[in-house]
Amino acid sequence: MVTAVTSLGRSGLSDWLIQRFSAVVLAAYTIFIVAFIFSVPEMTYELWTALFAQLWMRAFSLLALLCVAAHGWIGLWGVLTDYVTSRMMGGKALFLRMSALTIYAVITLAYLVWGIEVLWGF
């Protein structure tokens, strides 16, 4: 039996909703960035920094960064609970799942702190 201890939303429905919401945000962010790059005849550093100097772009980028973290966590949790099971791995399954999620959490936290530093310059 799989418990919701490491689940982000504490239930399958909330995890599903977070996963779908984050996918929509990430798709919108990707489409916007690609459209911006292709709509500008000559990309310059000044143009790029002017885009990210705007509050709405920083907020949109921060939202996208948080969505990457949530989407990845739920996806990794789902894959690990589906494929790293006691039937296949014996008693090592829980240790392997928790180790992978801990490594992901540490790396993601580092990227979130770094991303916030880049976006907001604290």
Image (tube, rainbow, N blue to C red):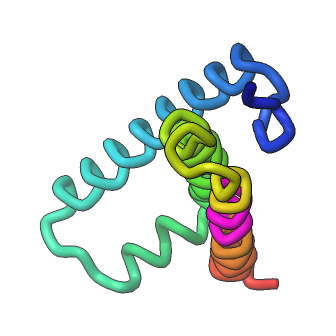
Magenta residues span 97-104
Q: Is residue 59 visible?
A: no
From what the image shows, is residue 94 above or below residue 122? above
Q: Residue 36: x percent and y percent?
A: 29, 54
State left or right for residue 117 relative to residue 3: left
Quarter of the image where the C terminus is located: bottom right
> Residue at the spot x=28%, y=82% of the render?
44
Would residue 14 appear left or right of 78 to someone viewing this image?
A: right
What percent of the width, then of the height, locates residue 23? 48, 34
The x and y percentages for residue 14 are: 74, 20
Is residue 83 in view from this perspective?
Answer: yes
Query: Looking at this view, is 70 or 28 the one in front?
Result: 70
Return the x and y of residue 112 as percentages of the image width and height. Answer: 69, 69
Pick the front one: 67 or 75: 75
Q: Is residue 40 magenta?
A: no
Task: Name the residue located 54 percent from the left edge and 68 percent from the top edge.
Answer: 52
Front residue of 93/25: it is 93
* Residue sitting farthest toward the top: 13
Q: Residue at x 81, y 31 (%)?
A: 4
Q: Which quadrant of the figure contains the N terminus? A: top right
Residue 30 horizontal side relative to residue 95, left or right = left
Q: Is residue 115 left or right of residue 37?
A: right
Q: Is residue 99 magenta?
A: yes
Dominant SS of magenta comes to helix
Rendered image quadrant of residue 108: bottom right
Residue 70 vertical placement versus 2 (above, below): below
Q: Residue at horizontal 74%, vertical 30%?
A: 2
